[in-house]
Amino acid sequence: MSEVSVFAGQIKPKKVYNIAIVVSSFNSLITDSLLKGALDTLTQRGIANEHIEVYRVPGAFEIPLTCKRIFSSKNIDGIITLGAIIRGETPHFEFVAGECASGIQRISLEFNKPVSFGVLTTENVEQALNRAGIKFGNKGCDAANALIQQLQVYEEAFI
């Protein structure tokens, strides 16, 4: 029986990745912490500052179009998206969260490049803070690690 090929993104990268981070300014107490976690993780993974670009947008709804503009005009290998959508008293939460998530997915598929989803969708501020580094780790770190692993899987399997 032959050995099965497994591509898990565990290789050391052969190239330098150019990474963009699109971060919502809304709920900046939370998103600033997510951004710090993502930047720290990229640095730890060997991505130098000159290969990272940060784009601040007003809110999560603006993230997908910004990703599209980046892929259309820049030499970027992948994008980390960061935001915090917190449920309120109106259905606004569902509209913004759904459109943000589906928009990000469409951009990734359209450009055939990875976009990691680090946009929190929580019931309250406490949950968001917990996921931004207070209790449950930092989802900005998780999004950065996911993007690097995905880029490595592609490099390992398709290049």
Image (tube, rainbow, N blue to C red):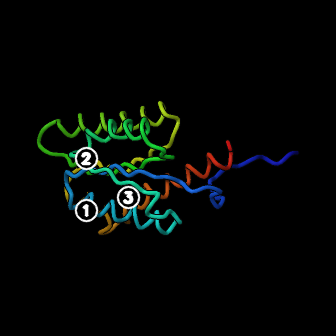
State which tag comes first along the sequence, 2 or 1.
2
In this view, 152 is above or below 158: below
Residue at 24% across, 60% down: 30
Residue at 49% across, 69% down: 44
Instruction: Residue type at mark 1: give it.
Output: Leu
Q: Position of residue 122 (x, y in %)?
A: 26, 50
Q: Position of residue 125 (x, y in %)?
A: 19, 57
Q: Are marks 2 and 3 in contact (CB under 8 Å)?
A: no
Q: Position of residue 97 (x, y in %)?
A: 28, 40
| Cα–Cα gap, marks 2 and 1 | 20 Å
Kindly identify which numbered label has been placed on residue 158.
Answer: none
| Cα–Cα gap, marks 3 and 1 | 10 Å
Report which residue position mark 2 lands on. 57
In this view, the residue farthest toward the left is: 89
Q: Residues within 10 Å of mark 2 (few under 14, many from 20)?
A: some
Q: Residues within 10 Å of mark 3 (few under 14, many from 20)?
A: many
Report which residue position mark 1 lands on. 129
Report which residue position mark 3 lands on. 139
State which tag comes first along the sequence, 3 or 1.
1
Q: Residues within 10 Å of mark 1 (few under 14, many from 20)?
A: many
State which tag comes first along the sequence, 2 or 3.
2
Mark nearer the viewer, 2 or 3: 2
Left or right of 116? Residue 45 is right
